[in-house]
C-alpha cells in the first residue's frame, strides 16, 4: 500500500497517474485491472485509463477539506496493490494574496 498527499483547489481537475511498470516487472506479471474510488470526501473520477502497467484518471474536487482516493490494482497473478491519494482541498477565495498593490 502506498499513500501520496497532494493539494488542489475546490473545483479543480487534475490527472493523477500511477506507474506499476517497475514493480510488475520485478514480480514477472502485469496489471490486469484497476478500480478508482472515492473513499472519503467530495470528488469525482473520470477518464480512467490503463495501458502498459500505467493507470490514470481525472480527479475533480467538489468541496473543501480532504478527499481520499483509493486505487486498487489487480495483477495478472492475482496479487492486489492498493494506492491512496490524499488530496487537501482548499477554497480559492480564502487564499491570502502576497501581492502588494
Image: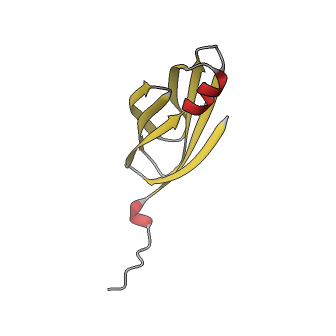
On the question of residue 12 being in view, the answer is yes
Q: Quadrant of the C terminus?
A: bottom left
| Residue 55 rendering spot, x and y as whole percentages | 47, 30
| Residue 40 rendering spot, x and y as whole percentages | 57, 38
Q: Quadrant of the N terminus?
A: top right
On the question of residue 20 being in view, the answer is no
Quarter occupied by residue 24: top right
Residue appearing at x 40%, y 75% in the figure: 97
Residue appearing at x 37%, y 80% in the figure: 99
Quarter occupied by residue 45: top left
Residue appearing at x 40%, y 27% in the figure: 49
Of 47 and 93, the residue lying toward us: 47
| Residue 98 rendering spot, x and y as whole percentages | 42, 78
Quarter occupied by residue 50: top left
Residue appearing at x 51%, y 23% in the figure: 34
| Residue 46 rendering spot, x and y as whole percentages | 38, 32
Amino acid at each position: 500500500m502506498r499513500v501520496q498527499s497532494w493539494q488542489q483547489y475546490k473545483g479543480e481537475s487534475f490527472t493523477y497517474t500511477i506507474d506499476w511498470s517497475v514493480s510488475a516487472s520485478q514480480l514477472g506479471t502485469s496489471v490486469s485491472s484497476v478500480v478508482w474510488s472515492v473513499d472519503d470526501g467530495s470528488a469525482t473520477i473520470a477518464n480512467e485509463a490503463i495501458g502498459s502497467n500505467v493507470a490514470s484518471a481525472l480527479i475533480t474536487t467538489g468541496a473543501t477539506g480532504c478527499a481520499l482516493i483509493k486505487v486498487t490494482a489487480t495483477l495478472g497473478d492475482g496479487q492486489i496493490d492498493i494506492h491512496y491519494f490524499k488530496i487537501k482541498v482548499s477554497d480559492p477565495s480564502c487564499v491570502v494574496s502576497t501581492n502588494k498593490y
